[in-house]
């Protein structure tokens, strides 16, 4: 598989795709892949960056397991300090939230679903970019470390070619239910096949309308879509909306257990 860029300390940025490609009942579409995060300390054990993305996540919607073993394999020059696993909240929170707040309430396991992202690789957000500029670039140059080239979060999360790839995965999965996680899969995938919807809010303003199945045809295939808040919202990870969290909690309690029969 081709490398898309380079993380700080030299690990390649790779696409993270569904590995179990057997037939599934449900297809899940997220936004972009995460990464393994490390705490970077200097030679005096002082933290330079508390959560630095240093490697592609080992599987899609990673749960944070095995971070230590991957980080130990990264070569760090003595003068650059050390890498240690970041706090658990930085590794795999969306994967855990997907399982606990979306799949489990629906009676689903990972083995029941085909997972996909609009952007199949890790992206550098603004916080990571600032941290790397502040702490990594100068010492990286002194130690002969590679300049990082992690792609930034794109302004356009899909194009015609990427939507075709996603549709191909959907067809191969044979899933008849598609879970869309938040606004972006609706905006950058669904609306190109059905322009009635452009965001999660378009599926209804009332609490009782959240998280319902909708019949639709995508790429000539009849299926049902299930638009839900992104795991960041459903588990209140970082900056999130209390109103979407409340809607989802009510959905978990009253709708999800009966939704898929």
Image (tube, grey):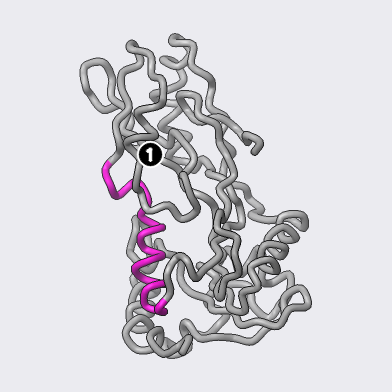
Residue found farthest to the front: 22
Residue depicted at 38% across the width and 14% down the height: 77
Q: Is residue 81 above or below residue 168?
A: above
**Residue 15 occupies quadrant:** top right
Span shown in magenta: 87-107
State the residue in front, 125 or 12: 12
Left or right relative to 195: residue 31: left
State the residue in front, 28 or 90: 28
Image x and y of residue 260, in percent = 48, 86
Q: Is residue 112 above or below residue 140?
A: below
Image x and y of residue 220, in percent = 78, 78
Q: Is residue 90 above or below residue 138?
A: below
Q: State which quarter of the image contains the N terminus.
A: top right
**Residue 193 occupies quadrant:** bottom right
Secondary element type, mark 1: strand
Left or right relative to 124: residue 102: left
Q: Residues within 10 Å of mark 1 (few under 14, many from 20)?
A: many
Residue depicted at 55% across the width and 58% down the height: 20
Image x and y of residue 121, in percent = 57, 45
Give the number of marks.
Answer: 1
User: Is 227 in the magenta?
Assistant: no
Give the residue number, with chain letter if any, for mark 1.
Answer: 37
User: Is 97 in the magenta?
Assistant: yes
Residue depicted at 66% across the width and 36% down the height: 2
Image x and y of residue 209, in percent = 48, 88
Residue depicted at 64% across the width and 87% down the height: 215
Q: What's the magenta bit mostly, secondary-structure-wise?
A: helix
**Residue 218 occupies quadrant:** bottom right
């Amino acid at each position: 598989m081709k490398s898309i860029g380079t993380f700080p300390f030299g690990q390649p940025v790779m696409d993270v795709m569904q590995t179990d490609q057997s037939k599934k009942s449900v297809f899940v579409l997220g936004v972009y892949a995460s990464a393994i995060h490390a705490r970077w300390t200097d030679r005096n054990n002082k933290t330079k960056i508390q959560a630095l993305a240093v490697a592609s996540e080992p599987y899609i919607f990673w749960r944070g397991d095995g971070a230590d073993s991957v980080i130990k394999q990264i070569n760090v020059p003595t003068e650059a300090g050390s890498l240690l696993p970041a706090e658990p909240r930085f590794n795999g929170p969306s994967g855990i939230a997907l399982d606990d707040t979306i799949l489990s309430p629906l009676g689903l396991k990972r083995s029941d679903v085909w997972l996909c992202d609009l952007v199949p690789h890790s992206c550098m957000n603004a916080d990571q970019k600032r941290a790397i500029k502040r702490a990594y670039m100068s010492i990286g140059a002194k130690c002969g470390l590679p300049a990082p080239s992690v792609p930034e979060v794109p302004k356009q999360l899909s194009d015609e070619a990427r939507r075709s790839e996603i549709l191909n995965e959907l067809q191969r999965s044979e899933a008849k239910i598609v879970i869309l996680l938040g606004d972006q899969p609706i905006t950058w995938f669904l609306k190109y096949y059905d322009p009635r919807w452009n965001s999660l809010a378009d599926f209804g303003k009332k609490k009782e309308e959240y998280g319902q199945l909708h019949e639709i045809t995508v790429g000539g295939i009849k299926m049902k879509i299930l638009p839900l808040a992104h795991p960041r919202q459903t588990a209140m990870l970082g900056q999130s909306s209390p109103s979407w969290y409340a809607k989802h909690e009510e959905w978990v309690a009253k709708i999800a257990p009966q939704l898929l029969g």
